């Protein structure tokens, strides 16, 4: 039994090592995404970016428009600025693209993004928000691809840059480095091909807002859950002190 147990541990260790090596070899290291799930202004801007640049192809089928009231938007603001595929505020956020055209153009339906920030992660790189934050900031022009775009975080990605008007067009600057006695190409910066509507800092802020919204959308009640949890812990702490003193008072005359 011991031999079987140790053999199982060895196989498990090799599998984990292999997965880490594979994860490390896919694209570049992920940048840390800013945490903005408590910032209403950032969430509102992220919702606007999502509705204008993501909902044309991607759905959020488990999210209803009226839930955006939780981030401070009125029903009128939602109807006037964020609803393009329906006129009912109680409907779910469905993509405006025809599913048949999506299958014809992309070979399949673009994935639903309701919980993308919670589901996307990789060993040794970071969280789902980190992946999304890096992905949306590392698109570059690549004429060898059908879409004309590629991505450093997701090499050979099939989706073109949805925010190219805001970011502009860039090409990566690669330098030659020595790795284990062999020459290899390493990313060292960006060369601007065509400027976008936003500066680089403004674009990073916009992507941070969008990722914050995607993170909030995956669990809209997360902030409320944390606040309730804090109050529960405070109550339990106070109750422990009261229970301790009551116990001492009850047993003080018992020998």
Image (tube, rainbow, N blue to C red):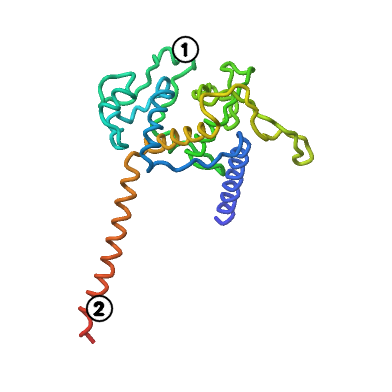
111 vs 191, nearest the viewer: 191
209 vs 135, nearest the viewer: 209
Residue that protrudes farthest toward the right in the picture:
181
Residue 203 location in percent, x, y? 51, 31
Residue 4 location in percent, x, y? 57, 52
* Disc on the earlier residue, 1 or 2: 1
Mark 1 and 2 residues: CB-CB less than 8 Å, in contact? no
- Which quadrant holds the N terminus? bottom right
Is residue 234 shown left or right of residue 56?
left
- Which quadrant holds the C terminus? bottom left
Q: Residue at x 44, y 35 (%)?
A: 209
Q: Secondary structure at mark 1?
A: helix
Is residue 3 shown left or right of residue 246?
right
Residue 165 location in percent, x, y? 51, 21
Badge 2: residue crowd in 10 Å (few <14, some 14–19, many ≥20): few
Q: Is residue 255 above or below residue 166?
A: below
**Label ID, residue 201:** none
Q: Residue at x 27, y 65 (%)?
A: 238
> What distance separates the C-alpha of mark 1 from that of mark 2?
75 Å
For label 1, the residue is 104
Q: Is residue 98 above or below residue 63?
A: above
Q: Residue at x 56, y 25 (%)?
A: 157
């Amino acid at each position: 039994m011991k031999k079987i147990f140790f053999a199982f541990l060895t196989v498990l260790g090799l599998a984990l090592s292999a997965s880490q090596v594979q994860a490390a070899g896919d694209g570049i290291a992920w940048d840390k995404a800013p945490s903005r799930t408590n910032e209403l202004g950032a969430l509102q801007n992220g919702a606007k970016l999502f509705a204008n640049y993501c909902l044309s192809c991607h759905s959020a089928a488990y999210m209803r428009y009226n839930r955006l009231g939780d981030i401070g938007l009125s029903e009128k603001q939602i109807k006037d600025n964020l609803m393009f595929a329906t006129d009912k505020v109680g409907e779910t956020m469905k993509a405006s693209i025809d599913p048949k055209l999506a299958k014809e153009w992309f070979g399949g339906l673009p994935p639903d993004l309701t919980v993308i920030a919670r589901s996307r992660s990789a060993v040794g790189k970071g969280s789902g928000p980190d992946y999304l934050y890096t992905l949306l900031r590392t698109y570059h022009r690549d004429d060898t691809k059908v879409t004309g775009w590629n991505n450093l975080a997701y090499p050979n990605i099939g989706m073109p840059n949805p925010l190219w008007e805001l970011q502009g067009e860039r090409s990566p600057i690669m330098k030659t480095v020595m790795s284990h006695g062999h020459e290899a190409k390493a990313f060292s910066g960006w060369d601007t091909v065509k400027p976008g509507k936003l500066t680089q800092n403004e674009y990073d802020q916009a992507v941070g807002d969008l990722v914050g919204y995607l993170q909030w959308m995956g669990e809209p009640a997360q902030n409320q859950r944390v606040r309730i949890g804090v109050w529960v812990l405070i109550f339990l702490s106070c109750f422990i002190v009261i229970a301790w003193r009551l116990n001492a008072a009850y047993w003080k005359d018992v020998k």
